[in-house]
Image: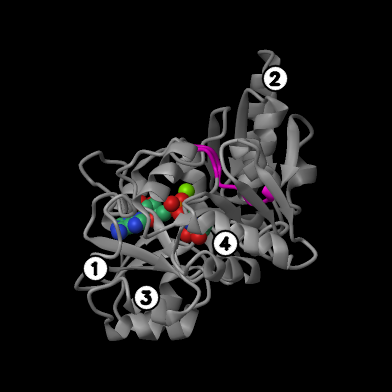
Amino acid sequence: MKTIYADMTAGIDRKLMQKAGDILLSGGLVAFPTETVYGLGGNALDAEASRKIYAAKGRPSDNPLIVHIAEFDALERIVTDVPQEAKDLADAFWPGPMTMILNKNDRVPASTTGGLGTVAIRMPDNEIAAAMIRAGGGYIAAPSANTSGRPSPTTAQHVKDDLDGKIDMIIDGGPVGIGVESTIIDLTEKIPMILRPGYINMEMLRDVLGEVRMDPGLHFNDPNFHPKAPGMKYRHYAPKAPLTIVEGPQDRVVEEIRSLTARKEAAGGKVGIIATDESAAAYDRGIVKSIGTRTEEITISMHLYGILRDFDDLGVDVIYSEAFDTPRMGQAIMNRLIKAAGHQVIKV
Ligand code: TXA
Ligand code: MG
């Protein structure tokens, strides 16, 4: 299939947007920008379109999709009831990087929710996304637009690298602003539960909901603890080279990564290092990339997946990364980084 490339970096192109809507209404797939990561969209109420999404990504079909909407009223038409918490969260954070889990009604096909009786719903904060959702019928199922297992795409080029020739259209809206996927909050639990940390953190959710807890399945490496969101159990976001995180006081971290790098290079290995603007100059070996600055944590989340992809392209043998336990988004960033590392963490 020839993938149409729609450049909307300078603004929405009406004709191409109508084309995107037509593709979605007839069961096709369109990748599009959101404020978190690029999504791979298909009509969420069309079982066949959902199946196409799984096929294009090579995604296990028990891993449910998020339904993207452009107005709050759309939510009422796909769930059994709308609790007050959902209205309060929507008032506080929609459009924005937050996904709610609610009980679904029959309009949502089982293939969209991986057979679950609940549905994930999000209203993204991006003009192109909103226009596309409306043009495509109002309910767009969209996982991140990467091949399953690869780092999520934060630019249209990342989408192209993974999905060119496999989907109908890619809309380029420029690089995303946040860089890690939305926070998922499950409102079908007695106490609202975070199934995936993101930009909207625990504190922000507690300000609106009162009591909130973190899915205990996220904390443990123990195979007996299963995260409730089916997607959180997979080794997502994996770069090709093994990644090791070094955690501890900053000077000890630098020292450890320097010596690991020296040893690996002495054995003939090509080493990638993920540092920050503050630390990059402290490394004199390896291929050093700064992920951003610790004084502005959004720069770190924004570049996380891109840097993992860059090291794939450079063909390094190993990657060492500093830890980024930043105050607001640290939980979201480290959740992704630890998964990318397959839980390989050295504490110094
Ligand atoms: O920021 C985002 O949320 C991005 C952009 C494109 O909107 N989308 C995204 O989708 O991250 P995806 O498919 O890569 O991740 C969806 C996650 C998976 O971990 C999945 O298991 C979980 O949401 N999920 C979806 N429906 C669920 C449900 N009914 N119950 C529990 N978890 C659910
Ligand atoms: Mg994903």
- Which residue is depicted at the point 57% across and 61% down? 21
Q: Is residue 199 magenta?
A: no
Dot 3 falls on a residue whose secondary structure is helix
Q: Which residue is mark 2?
A: 265
Whole-number angstrom distance, CA of label 1 to CA of label 4 = 24 Å
* For the residues bearing labels 1 and 4, Cβ distance under 8 angstroms: no
Indicate the amino acid at tag 1: Asn
- Which residue is depicted at the point 68% across and 46% down? 4
On the image, the x and y values in percent for residue 251 come to 65, 47
> Which mark is first along the chain, 4 or 3?
4
Whole-number angstrom distance, CA of label 1 to CA of label 2 = 57 Å
- Which residue is depicted at the point 29% across and 78% down? 211
Mark whose residue sits in front, 3 or 2: 3
Residue 21: give its label: 4
Dot 1 falls on a residue whose secondary structure is loop
| Label 2 neighbour load within 10 Å: few <14, some 14-19, many 20+ | some
> Which mark is first along the chain, 2 or 3?
3
Indicate the amino acid at tag 2: Glu
Q: Is residue 52 left or right of residue 226?
A: right
Boundaries of the magenta span: 146-156
Mark whose residue sits in front, 1 or 2: 1
> Which mark is first along the chain, 4 or 1?
4
For disc 1, does the CB lie below 8 Å from ligand 1?
Answer: no
Q: Which residue is mark 3?
A: 75
Whole-number angstrom distance, CA of label 1 to CA of label 3 = 11 Å
Indicate the amino acid at tag 4: Gly
Given residues 4 and 56, the one toward you in this image is 4
Residue 105: give its label: 1
| Label 4 neighbour load within 10 Å: few <14, some 14-19, many 20+ | many
Indicate the amino acid at tag 3: Leu
Quarter-of-image position of residue 100: bottom left
* For the residues bearing labels 2 and 4, Cβ distance under 8 angstroms: no
